[in-house]
Image (cartoon, rainbow, N blue to C red):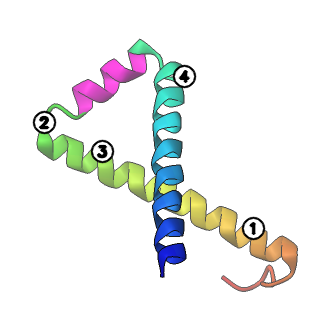
């Protein structure tokens, strides 16, 4: 039981450390202009919601397409099926 708990705590620690590292790197990569655009778009809660929905839909569809391409190239799914 202690081993499972230790693995869970260690996994969460690695996960949150990875999130912190991604945050720091994204802050370096994104320029001031992009942050200004995001700040303006998310000032109004309704516009922020729409921007979130559109962004989420785009990311979701591109991730799904990548998964389907991986299945097709591995032979798990034929090109004719959707």
Q: Which residue is mark 3?
A: 51
Cα separation, mark 2 vs mark 4, equals 25 Å
Crowding at label 4, few (<14), some or many (≥20) Cα neighbours within 10 Å? few
Crowding at label 2, few (<14), some or many (≥20) Cα neighbours within 10 Å? few
Mark 2 lies on a secondary structure that is loop
Question: What's the mark number on residue 44?
Answer: 2
Mark 1 lies on a secondary structure that is helix
Lower position in the chain sequence, tag 2 or tag 1:
2
Lower position in the chain sequence, tag 4 or tag 1:
4
Residue found 59% across the figure and 67% down from its top: 64
Crowding at label 3, few (<14), some or many (≥20) Cα neighbours within 10 Å? some
Residue 34 belongs to the span the image colors magenta: yes
Cα separation, mark 4 vs mark 3, equals 21 Å
Residue 12 at x, y = what percent? 46, 58
Q: Are marks 3 and 2 in contact (CB under 8 Å)?
A: no
Lower position in the chain sequence, tag 2 or tag 4:
4
Residue 58 at x, y = what percent? 47, 54
Cα separation, mark 3 vs mark 2, equals 10 Å
Residue found 75% across the figure and 67% down from its top: 69
Q: Which residue is mark 4?
A: 29
Lower position in the chain sequence, tag 3 or tag 2:
2
Is 64 on the left-hand or right-hand side of 37?
Answer: right
Lower position in the chain sequence, tag 4 or tag 3:
4
Question: What's the mark number on residue 69?
Answer: 1
Cα separation, mark 2 vs mark 1, equals 37 Å
Crowding at label 1, few (<14), some or many (≥20) Cα neighbours within 10 Å? some
- 15 in relation to 2, above or below: above
Q: Are marks 4 and 3 in contact (CB under 8 Å)?
A: no
**Which range of residues does the magenta coloring cover?**
33-41
Mark 3 lies on a secondary structure that is helix
Residue 37 at x, y = what percent? 33, 23
């Amino acid at each position: 039981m202690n081993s499972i708990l230790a693995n869970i705590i260690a996994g969460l620690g690695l996960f949150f450390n990875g999130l912190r590292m991604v945050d720091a790197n994204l802050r370096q990569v994104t320029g001031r202009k992009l942050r200004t655009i995001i700040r303006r778009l998310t000032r109004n809660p309704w516009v922020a919601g729409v921007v979130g929905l559109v962004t989420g839909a785009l990311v979701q569809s591109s991730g799904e397409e990548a998964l389907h391409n991986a299945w097709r190239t591995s032979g798990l799914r034929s090109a004719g099926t959707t």
